[in-house]
Amino acid sequence: MTRSLRSSDHDALALICAVAQTRDARITSAALSNHHPVAGAQLQALGVLTRVGDEAAATSLADHEDTPVALARSPDGRSFGYFSPQAGWVTALPDDQAVYALSFETLLPKLLNGLDCQLVSRPLELLPGLLWEVGGARLPGRSARVPVWFGRRLSDPTTWALMLEQFRQRPSPGLRIVLSLTAEAKLPKTYVSGHEIIAVQSVIDPSDAFRIDPQILAARLAHGRDDGQPVSIAADGASITIRGKSYTFTGTKQRAVIRHLYGAWISGSAECLTAEVLESAGFNVSVNTLAKAFAKRSDWREFLKEEAGRCWIYL
């Protein structure tokens, strides 16, 4: 019988995602003890949160205020604290000054151990502290490994732009997955051809909050996410859904055509030069129409239009 997640597991994963959204992926001891005592202790025990230093400020407890106060060395030089108008000198306890950071060296192998990624134990850091390449994953129903990247703070416009530049510099020949610690609702809605950007929380193992379920991830890739749009597509172009009806394509070149036209449709400039679409998909010059590209099937005509050297998705 499959064990369902304990509430503490949910809380621990939520805390991981919340800390990952901060600039430095750090949280203070005071924040942990005051707001996340159980989840914080759980993540420290797992080595996912590790102490990395002390902060130079603390919350004034003597004056019952929530604003931070700067810490200074005590007159005898043996400790740090602050002067309170109400209580005089207040010594800050060492544990109150602790700062904890997410250990991605510990976290990534835990989350990805079900995907059999070659680089998971030694990820390639593409953007320091923000984006990693973890290798190709074995997923159910796919004969070839799927390249996987792992990112955080993707709702930040600067981080998003830096990631897109990495896509440009390191193009993927097929589908690439980017697993994100950013919640799905906060991810940019921009379509990125050939990439499926998936929130970790949406593909987690129902019985283990610290492990991505390969079956759920594979299903997500096959069906894409339901964002309420009249047109949705699997990131690799293997299927496209038009107002609830799905069309599946097995040829890599046909999938490339679908991705190209979907990218144009979602950008608001639906019409494309047919010759450019076919060339970018890898067809030779003898294949100069969609009819030739999609030979032996006609259902593409239900949602694709071709006319006067141009083609587009139409509803």
Image (cartoon, rainbow, N blue to C red):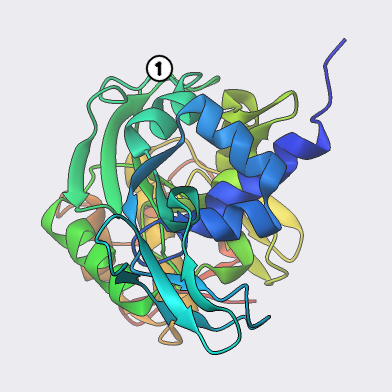
State which quadrant residue 140 falls in: top right
Residue at the top extreme, as displayed: 1
Q: Residues within 10 Å of mark 1 (few under 14, many from 20)?
A: some
Location of the N terminus by quadrant is: top right
Please tell me which residue is depicted at 49% across the width and 22% down the height of the picture: 139
Is residue 242 in view? yes
Q: Pick whichever, 28 or 75, lies toward us.
A: 75
Please tell me which residue is depicted at 47% across the width and 77% down the height of the picture: 265
Q: Pick whichever, 66 or 13, lies toward us.
A: 66
* x and y, in percent, of residue 254 in the image: 39, 48
The total number of labels drawn is 1
Residue named by callout 1: 116
Is residue 188 in view? no
Q: Is residue 179 above or below residue 79?
A: above
Location of the C terminus by quadrant is: bottom right
Q: Amino acid at mark 1?
A: Asp
State which quadrant residue 186 falls in: bottom right
SS for callout 1 = loop
Residue 98 located left or right of residue 164? right
* x and y, in percent, of residue 68 in the image: 49, 79
Q: Pick whichever, 29 or 196, lies toward us.
A: 29
Please tell me which residue is depicted at 46% across the width and 54% down the height of the picture: 197
Residue at the front extreme, as displayed: 76
* x and y, in percent, of residue 91 in the image: 46, 63
Q: Is residue 105 above or below residue 282?
A: above
Q: Pick whichever, 84 or 234, lies toward us.
A: 84
Q: Is residue 245 above or below residue 8?
A: below
Residue 151 located left or right of residue 85? left
Residue 265 located left or right of residue 13? left
